[in-house]
Amino acid sequence: MGTLSRTTTSRTLRRRLLVPVAMMSFALVAAGCNDDGSGSEGAASPAAHAGTTGPAQSSPESSDPAASPPETAPSSPAAPSDSGASSGADAAGPGRCTADGLGMSVKQGDGGAGQVYYELTFVNKSGHSCTLNGFPGVSLIQRDGQVIGAPAKRDGASHGTTVLAAGKTAHVVLHTLNQGIADGGCWKQGAYLRVYPPGSKEALTLRDPQIRVCGDRFTTTSVER
């Protein structure tokens, strides 16, 4: 009986000691889970969530400019040089001749077999090169400004673009008939010759051009040298 009593007492003491040890072990395991972040989502701290969803917050040490490498500016294409821009402008060529940059004269040319020709000449007085391309608008005008007959019709095909350097000339040929060669009689003598250079809305005017149109024939060629 003495032996049995001692055995029972020993078992009772061991049970009493094991209960606190088990509780302490459980507490240590729970604390360990919270410390390394492997616990439940509810146990995670606000700082941990901010680190995963928001922008990283710099510490005072990392905000020091000397502690981080300088940013490199993005490279950009080089701006075109002045020489390139000038060459592009030169490639465009001279502009169209305007009425205020031109002078004009007219003289009778060679004719025969009842045909009468007048050479109408343009001179570039603008001081720089310009171009003429196509047919001018040509009319005989009375002193009161009224058009005599009709403007000159186009004769033949266009000769294309003519480049006039400063002081250079180009011309067109006006064509009519001698009196009596064809029906229609002759128009009144014009007091002025009004000419619109090709592409221009401004006109040149020549006083007393000495042009007489007969047989209802009045034509102009395109500009050429």
Image (cartoon, grey):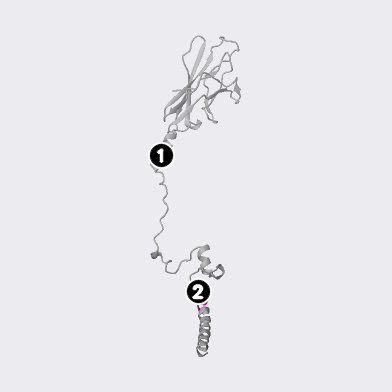
Is 92 in front, or is 186? Answer: 92
Neighbourhood count class around disc 1 (C-alpha, 10 Å): few under 14, some 14–19, many 20 upward: few
How many marks the image carries: the answer is: 2
- Could you say where residue 163 lies in the image, as x and y percent from the top left? 44, 28
Report the residue marked by disc 1.
86
- Could you say where residue 14 lies in the image, as x and y percent from the top left? 50, 83
Amino acid type at mark 1: Ser
Neighbourhood count class around disc 2 (C-alpha, 10 Å): few under 14, some 14–19, many 20 upward: few
Which numbered disc covers residue 45? none
The structure residue drawn at horizontal position 49% and vertical position 32%, both measured from the top left corner, is 100
Q: Is residue 17 left or right of residue 84?
A: right
Amino acid type at mark 2: Val
- Could you say where residue 17 lies in the image, as x and y percent from the top left? 51, 83
The structure residue drawn at horizontal position 50% and vertical position 30%, both measured from the top left corner, is 99
The Cα–Cα distance between marks 1 and 2, rounded to whole angstroms, is 82 Å
Q: Give the magenta range.
A: 24-30
Is 86 in front, or is 29? Answer: 29
Q: Is residue 129 above or below residue 54?
A: above
Q: Quadrant of the C terminus?
A: top left
Where disc 2 sits, the SS reads helix
Q: Is residue 106 above or below residue 28?
A: above
Where disc 1 sits, the SS reads helix
Q: Which quadrant would residue 85 be assigned to in this image?
A: top left
Is 9 in front, or is 105? Answer: 9
Q: Residue 25 lies in magenta, yes or no?
A: yes
Report the residue marked by disc 2.
29
- Could you say where residue 15 lies in the image, as x and y percent from the top left? 53, 82
The disc, 1 or 2, on the residue closer to the chain's N-terminal end is 2
Q: Which quadrant would residue 72 be assigned to in this image?
A: bottom left
The structure residue drawn at horizontal position 52% and vertical position 78%, both measured from the top left corner, is 22
The structure residue drawn at horizontal position 49% and vertical position 73%, both measured from the top left corner, is 32
